[in-house]
Image (spheres, grey):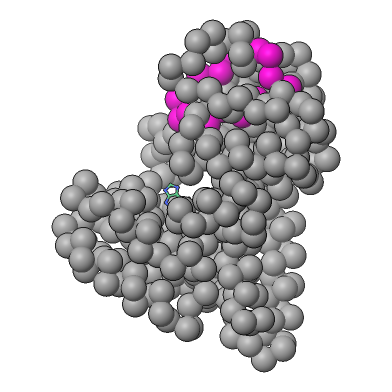
Amino acid sequence: MQIIDGKATAKAIKEEIRQEVDSIVSAGHRPPHLAAILVGHDGGSETYVAYKIKDCEEVGFRSSLVRFEEDVEEQVLLNKIKELNNDEELDGFIVQLPLPGHIDEPKVIETINPQKDVDGFHPENVGRTVIGLPSFVSATPYGIVELLKRYQIETSGKNCVIVGRSNIVGRPLSILMSQKSINATVTVAHSRTKNLEELCASADILIAALGSPGFIKKEMVKEGAVVIDVGTTRVPSTETKSGFRLKGDVIYDEVAPRCSFITPVPGGVGPMTRVSLLNNTLRAAKNNISG
Ligand code: GUN
């Protein structure tokens, strides 16, 4: 069994990005610039955005944080997005989700200029991904595919079962895994799937992305399978400074001995998600430079 070290892989990719930033700046261009819009003070969102800003600093990007209070009017948020769409000093931006209930999330996403949509959430980017055109792909699926490539994991003709059909992870990942460069045979499982246990146990590559801590048990995993754990549920902990720790969707201790490869939580998919946002921002910056 080999542990897929997302932390080390992300570190190596960050170094590659940092070198590209150096060449961009040496050529006389400004560094890539990412902005994040954060609405309200949700603990998880605050943490994720703080990481995004820190990641930018580490690779030499500029970053900006735009904050609104929880009760911001939808129109005020939409106006800010339109302003960022037209800001030539900015390559890409994200609106941290979830948004408060009074704001129409799909409307917000559709207002983002697809060329600055480094989250890859805009329907234009999702549609382009589906038909294999160049696009921004959302960070978690992008990061998982990069991990499979860097660990040279055989995907062609393999049975890939993805548990979870979210717009951010399961669904776009199913599209990527079935593309010609990857060639897996993909099944997307969800809450209404029948015989889920047997289905998971038939997977050569099992991707758990349902956000239910400890859902995947050893009976659901075939001997020699590749297991990718996307779960990052924050659970209270007395052992960490933050008061939380991250729990995956897979019972790691009992599942790992059965696997050929497995991602841990933390240190697996999470760091790759973070670095993928940097990759998308670098691409947006290079697109702007080349016009
Ligand atoms: N909330 C949880 N994950 C994400 C993400 O990747 N991007 C944004 N914008 N919000 C999120």
Using the image as rendered, state which of residue 109 and residue 225 is in the foreground. Answer: 109
Residue 53 shows in this picture: no
Rendered-image quadrant of the C terminus: bottom right
The answer to whether 267 is drawn above or below residue 197 in the figure is below
**Which residue is depicted at the point 74% across and 57% down?**
12
**Is 207 in the magenta?**
yes
| Residue numbers of the magenta segment | 201-218
The answer to whether 174 is drawn above or below residue 132 in the figure is above
Using the image as rendered, state which of residue 57 and residue 40 is in the foreground. Answer: 40
**232 left or right of 83 in image:** right
**Is 263 in the magenta?**
no
**Which residue is depicted at the point 67% across and 85% down?**
25
Using the image as rendered, state which of residue 45 and residue 140 is in the foreground. Answer: 140
The answer to whether 98 is drawn above or below residue 155 in the figure is below
Identify the image quadrant of residue 136: bottom right
Rendered location of residue 162, percent (x, y) = 59, 28
**Which residue is depicted at the point 74% across and 65% down?**
16
Residue 244 shows in this picture: yes
Classified by dominant secondary structure, the portion drawn in magenta counts as loop
**148 left or right of 208 in image:** right
**67 left or right of 190 in image:** left
Residue with the most extreme bottom position: 28
Rendered location of residue 190, percent (x, y) = 47, 23
Rendered location of residue 244, percent (x, y) = 41, 38
**Which residue is depicted at the point 72% across and 73% down?**
20
The answer to whether 15 is drawn above or below residue 211 in the figure is below
Rendered location of residue 7, percent (x, y) = 67, 47
Number of marks: 0
Rendered-image quadrant of the N terminus: top right
